[in-house]
Amino acid sequence: MAAEDKPNVVTTRWWWVRHAPVRNDGGNIYGQSDLPCDTSDTYVFNAVAKVLPRKAVWYSSNLMRTHQTAEAIWAAGYPKPASMPWEADLAEQNLGKWQGMNRAQFIASRPVGSSWFADINEPAPGGESFMDLYNRTRRTIERINSEAGGQDIIAVAHGGTIKAAIGLALEGQVERALSFDIDNVSITRLDYFSSPGRSVWRLPMVNQQPWIADDAHAEMHQLAGPEVKKLA
């Protein structure tokens, strides 16, 4: 018998959607800067709208790019929910003084093979560490699991936030979560099974891109990490 079929097991399915690409960042790190995103690729949003479950509970971060992404999904045919609470603790990592710095120059200055802007315990000057992001994301997920357990939850958020959620699903192996790519508008599903005395996570899919069969939409992969080319 599957875990979700056993009595007294509550299954909560999280459908994480990363926001659409930010085109006006000037090649700079933006972190919690409240920049708009590009939702013009209707093919992408039509594909995502077909995959997401109906009758879900919606949440987003407090940054406009997540709200614009949700609006584009609804415009593509997904029934607009009655509400979508904004959760500031689901916002991207606050990268402090690194925000506004040239991304390629910054990446070139970091150790070769880095999976993120810094070590998970290193805070950005005037900002947060990835562990700070992880801890506030974890607290919010745990609270929502308690409030909306047993439902489908669609959370429109950010690459760092979704990696933090993956770290939680990997039983707190936060650094391993940084190895995952999270493309713009991609879907990551994490299932939470809770029963008296025990709870477990399952990762049915990470970074799913239902439009991927058409190369015309490859720009949903926005270079951000070690793959950014060093400046000549």
Image: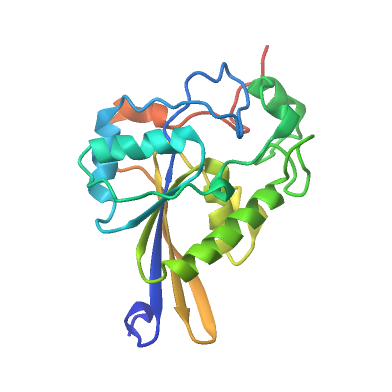
Residue 11 found in image quarter: bottom left
Whether residue 219 is visible = yes
Outermost residue, left direction?
77
Does 100 sit above or below residue 18?
Answer: above
Task: Work out whether residue 185 or residue 79 is closer to the camera in this orientation and state it.
Answer: 79
Task: Work out whether residue 185 or residue 113 is closer to the camera in this orientation and state it.
Answer: 185
Does 216 sit above or below residue 141?
Answer: above
From the viewer's perspective, is 100 left or right of 62?
right
The N terminus sits in image quarter: bottom left
Task: Work out whether residue 7 or residue 75 is closer to the camera in this orientation and state it.
Answer: 75
User: In the image, residue 195 lies at what x, y percent?
Assistant: 46, 83
Indicate the colouring scheme.
rainbow
User: In the image, residue 59 lies at what x, y percent?
Assistant: 43, 51
Outermost residue, top direction?
232
Residue 191 found in image quarter: bottom left
The C terminus sits in image quarter: top right
Residue 34 found in image quarter: top right
Does 43 sit above or below residue 164?
Answer: above
Query: At 54% across and 86% down in the image, what residue appears?
Result: 197
Whether residue 212 is visible = no
User: In the image, residue 69 lies at what x, y percent?
Assistant: 38, 36
Query: At 24% across and 35% down in the image, what residue appears?
Result: 75
User: In the image, residue 101 lies at what x, y percent?
Assistant: 69, 21
From the viewer's perspective, is 7 left or right of 22?
left
Does 64 sit above or below residue 4?
Answer: above
Numbered circles on residues, count: 0
From the viewer's perspective, is 170 left or right of 85?
right
From the viewer's perspective, is 173 left or right of 86?
right
Query: At 40% across and 82% down in the image, what residue appears?
Result: 9
